[in-house]
């Protein structure tokens, strides 16, 4: 896995409120960098999936059920 | 963070609670029976630090106020990274909180609940959420089992939210797959229904065109049916008028000619006598003594004849123009109507309607009901010349009436037949319309199903990928957790479980497993007793607490355990307490533990005895 995180704006962790979402976003930054050069990599699908998880983790945290 | 002093007023069951000279290292044992106020001390710490307790959120903390008092307050002194701090927090009956954080020089660092929260999070490196999971073991949490231990451990590993979301995503994926399968079945049914409809795109326009033709012909027949009888009746009246006016016109014509001839003669005589009398020289004629007078008389006679002839001519013109011409127009109109009717009656329908209507009538076998063609022509009592004769009023009225009646009846039959054809056609048009609408509805349904299927497939793809990413991310957290367990928890786990269990791990399916020395294998967390589960949870809490303090670069931290051994037997309690005392050698230097009774043989740094119904406690 690359140690140089890809600067994807949608993975900006500074706006995230929950620890779980932040940890996930940080993981995605590393993972995106490692996998984005692979053949058949679908960046759009990756973004949609990551954003879905982040959004849902934030929602869960907002409901007072933080992980 | 080490607590050095606690001063609470009108808090819970205490009118005054003052804990001072608290040891910075070792066990602080809080003992007492039920309802003696042990848990209130932990709540006082939680309230002063974060403005809430385990079961009272910030907006409900007015319930912490001592009975009869107006407000509750807690003043907490603590040592953190070598510096002393003082935190004051109070709540009034309306639930309004005040909070102030001061440093060791009594400088105010923050003066509102919100800024105090921010300052504390910055200072300590954790918030209430982390505090309640790591450094504060709530009795209520443990006894009510509001949150199962496995969930607590998931929380400690930082994968609780991941595990929950992964469950949700799997359920949603399953629902979406079921919905997709149903949609695909529905789509096949729709496609089969579409295939079952044989729709000719040209059929409906053709039917409408045929209908227009048939209706046009029907209207023509109807127009003839209406026009011929009235025309025939009028012919009866017009016929006698025409004969009369015609006779009069001829009479006037004859008199006009006579008048003109007479006028020419008189004018010729007058001319001879007056203008060229020399032409009469040598012609033997009676001797008119008064020839000039005769010439004048001729002139007057000529004038009279001219006037009379003009009147006759005018009268003739008038009769011709205003009497005979309208009658001729009527006759022409009737003649044309009769001629049209005659021609139609003697023309086969298939020749009149054209290809498409003929094909349709043949397809529907409607020609068998068509009126017989050429019936009028074969009727010897009818003449094909009647329509032409009518134009000159040469046909007698009875003949016209009879012919008109015959044509009208034939047209009536045709009109009825065409009406039946239109009715039959309307049924087909309705069926075709229905087919077209059904086909369009199926097309719409198919389009909608295709869109929904695409949406579901996209959703499945996204959620599948999301689940995959979540799992991968979880594996990192799990690996980190397992590492901490390996590094920090093994000894505690062994001590707290009396060496029954020495290791613990979370696998990639979020399942928690403990290594049993007896069985030499991992057991599922759910398989072990609830008492042992709590021992493991407590060991985990200590291990993670130590890790957290270390990662925050703090030197030391207090931990508050409210009745952690409630379900332990005496032997296990003593062993666990001993382990806890030894554990204070780590970063969790100050361990507050509440118990019903103080055990023997365990070194305790300070004991605080709570007494039932005693509102003041100083220790």
Image: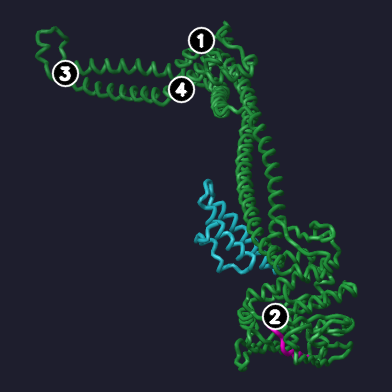
Chain colours: A cyan, B green
Mark nearer the N terminus (1 vs 4)? 4
Query: Which of the chains bears the disc numbered 2?
Result: B
Query: Which of the chains bears the disc numbered 3?
Result: B
Whole-Å distance between the Cαs marked 1 and 4? 22 Å
Whole-Å distance between the Cαs marked 1 and 3? 58 Å
Compare residues B142 and B353 and report the one nearer the observer: B142
Q: Residue at x 55, y 23 (%)?
A: B217
- According to the picture, the residue beneath numbered tag 1 turns out to be B384
Mark nearer the N terminus (3 vs 2)? 3
- According to the picture, the residue beneath numbered tag 3 turns out to be B271
Mark nearer the N terminus (1 vs 3)? 3
Q: Determine whether label 3 and label 2 are within 8 Å by CB.
A: no
Disc sitting over residue B557 in the figure? 2
Mark nearer the N terminus (2 vs 1)? 1
B195 on left or right of B262: right
How dense is the environment of label 3, judged by Cα within 10 Å: few (below 14), some, or many (20 and up)?
A: some
Query: Which of the chains bears the disc numbered 1?
Result: B
Whole-Å distance between the Cαs marked 2 and 1? 127 Å
Compare residues B37 and B597 and report the one nearer the observer: B597
x, y (%) of residue B256? 32, 18
Compare residues B466 and B336 and report the one nearer the observer: B466
x, y (%) of residue B357? 56, 21
B257 on left or right of B117: left
Let me know if residue B330 appears in the view. yes
x, y (%) of residue B617? 82, 91
- According to the picture, the residue beneath numbered tag 4 turns out to be B327
Disc sitting over residue B139 in the figure? none
- State which region is magenta: B1-9
Judged from the image, the secondary structure of the residue bearing numbered disc 2 is: loop
């Amino acid at each position: 896995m690359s140690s140089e995180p890809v600067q994807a704006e949608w993975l900006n962790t500074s706006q995230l409120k929950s620890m779980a979402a932040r940890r996930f976003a940080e993981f995605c930054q590393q993972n995106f960098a490692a996998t984005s050069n692979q053949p058949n990599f679908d960046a759009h699908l990756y973004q949609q999936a990551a954003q879905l998880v982040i959004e849902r983790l934030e929602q869960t945290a907002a409901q007072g059920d933080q992980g | 963070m080490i607590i050095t002093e606690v001063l609470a007023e009108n808090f819970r069951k205490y009118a005054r609670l003052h804990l001072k000279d608290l040891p910075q290292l070792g066990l602080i044992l809080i003992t007492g029976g039920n309802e003696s106020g042990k848990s209130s001390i932990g709540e006082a710490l939680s309230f002063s630090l974060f403005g809430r307790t385990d079961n009272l959120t910030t907006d409900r903390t007015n319930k912490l106020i001592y009975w009869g008092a107006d407000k509750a307050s807690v003043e907490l002194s603590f040592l953190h990274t070598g510096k002393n701090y003082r935190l004051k927090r109070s709540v009034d009956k309306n639930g309004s909180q005040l909070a102030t954080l001061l440093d060791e020089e009594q400088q105010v660092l923050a003066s509102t609940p919100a800024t105090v929260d921010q300052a504390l999070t910055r200072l300590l490196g954790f918030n209430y959420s982390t505090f309640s999971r790591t450094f504060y073991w709530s009795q209520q949490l443990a006894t009510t089992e509001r949150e199962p231990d496995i969930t607590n451990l998931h929380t400690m590993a930082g994968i609780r939210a991941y595990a929950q979301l992964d469950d949700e995503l799997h359920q949603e994926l399953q629902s979406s797959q079921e919905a997709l399968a149903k949609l695909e079945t529905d789509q096949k049914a729709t496609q089969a229904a579409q295939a079952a409809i044989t729709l000719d795109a040209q059929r409906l326009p053709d039917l409408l065109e045929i209908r227009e033709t048939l209706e046009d012909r029907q209207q023509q027949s109807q127009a003839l049916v209406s026009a011929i009888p009235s025309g025939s009746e009028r012919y009866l009246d017009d016929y006698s008028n025409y004969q009369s006016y015609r006779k009069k016109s001829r009479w006037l014509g004859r008199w006009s000619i006579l008048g003109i001839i007479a006028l020419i003669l008189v004018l010729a005589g007058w001319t001879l006598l007056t203008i060229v009398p020399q032409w009469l020289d040598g012609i033997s004629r009676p001797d008119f003594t008064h020839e000039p007078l005769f010439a004048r008389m001729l002139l007057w006679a000529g004038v009279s004849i001219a006037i009379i002839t003009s009147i006759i001519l005018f009268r003739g013109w008038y009769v011709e123009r205003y009497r005979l011409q309208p009658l001729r127009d009527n006759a022409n109109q009737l003649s044309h109507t009769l001629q049209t009717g005659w021609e139609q009656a003697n023309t086969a329908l298939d020749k009149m309607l054209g290809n498409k209507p003929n094909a349709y009538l043949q397809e529907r076998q409607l020609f068998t009901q068509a009126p017989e063609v050429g019936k009028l022509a074969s009727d010897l009592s009818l003449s094909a010349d009647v329509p032409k004769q009518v134009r000159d009023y040469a046909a007698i009225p009875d003949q016209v009436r009879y012919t008109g009646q015959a044509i009208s009846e034939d047209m009536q039959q045709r009109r009825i037949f065409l009406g039946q054809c239109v009715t039959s056609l309307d049924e087909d048009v309705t069926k075709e319309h229905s087919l077209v609408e059904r086909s369009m509805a199926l097309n719409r349904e198919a389009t909608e199903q295709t869109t929904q299927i695409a949406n579901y497939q996209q959703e499945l793809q996204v959620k599948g990928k999301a689940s995959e990413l979540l799992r991968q991310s979880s594996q990192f957290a799990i690996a980190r957790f397992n590492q901490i367990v390996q590094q920090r928890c093994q000894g505690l786990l062994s001590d707290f479980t009396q060496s029954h269990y020495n290791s613990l791990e979370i696998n990639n399916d979020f399942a928690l497993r403990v290594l049993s020395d007896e069985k030499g294998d991992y057991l599922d967390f759910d398989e072990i007793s609830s008492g042992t589960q709590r021992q493991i949870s407590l060991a985990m809490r200590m291990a993670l607490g130590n890790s957290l303090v270390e990662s925050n670069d703090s030197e030391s931290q207090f931990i508050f355990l409210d009745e952690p051994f409630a379900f332990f037997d005496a032997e296990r309690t003593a062993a666990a307490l001993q382990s806890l005392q030894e554990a204070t050698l780590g970063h969790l230097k100050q361990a507050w533990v509440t118990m019903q009774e103080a055990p023997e043989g365990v070194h305790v740094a300070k004991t605080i005895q709570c007494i039932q119904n005693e509102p003041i406690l100083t220790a």
